[in-house]
Amino acid sequence: MIHGTGGKFFLLFDRSLVAFDPATGSHEKLADLPVEPRGSLALHDGRLYFASGSHLWSFRLEP
């Protein structure tokens, strides 16, 4: 889980990426992931990065 822009949190599950808004309690599935994420979650310049095995994956957030 990582705190993102606009007060939202981004969470990785076994095969999905979810945005959670604690102000409203709402959540939104952003993507089905092609791999199981294993490792940290980082946010940089509008992209979320995560590891799966020895590979680095990223997801571009909508502006």
Image (cartoon, grey):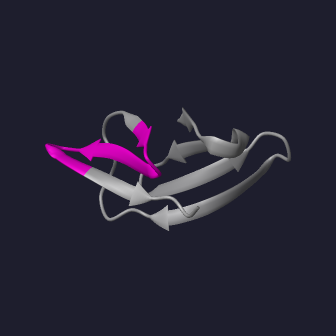
Q: Is residue 6 above or below residue 2?
A: below
Magenta stretch, main secondary structure, is strand
Identify the residue at horizontal 50%, vertical 55% (top origin): 17
- In this view, which residue lies farthest toward the right? 24
Image coordinates of residue 45 in percent, x first then y, are: 43, 47
Residue 51 belongs to the span the image colors magenta: yes
**Range of magenta residues:** 42-56
Q: Relative to the observer, which residue lies in front, 47 or 29?
A: 47
Q: On the picture, is 55 further left or further right than 44?
A: left
Q: Relative to the observer, which residue lies in front, 44 or 17?
A: 44
Q: On the picture, is 47 further left or further right than 11?
A: left
Q: On the picture, is 53 further left or further right than 11?
A: left
Image coordinates of residue 20 in percent, x first then y, are: 68, 47
Identify the residue at horizontal 58%, vertical 61% (top origin): 63
Image coordinates of residue 15 in percent, x first then y, are: 42, 57
Image coordinates of residue 38 in percent, x first then y, are: 30, 40
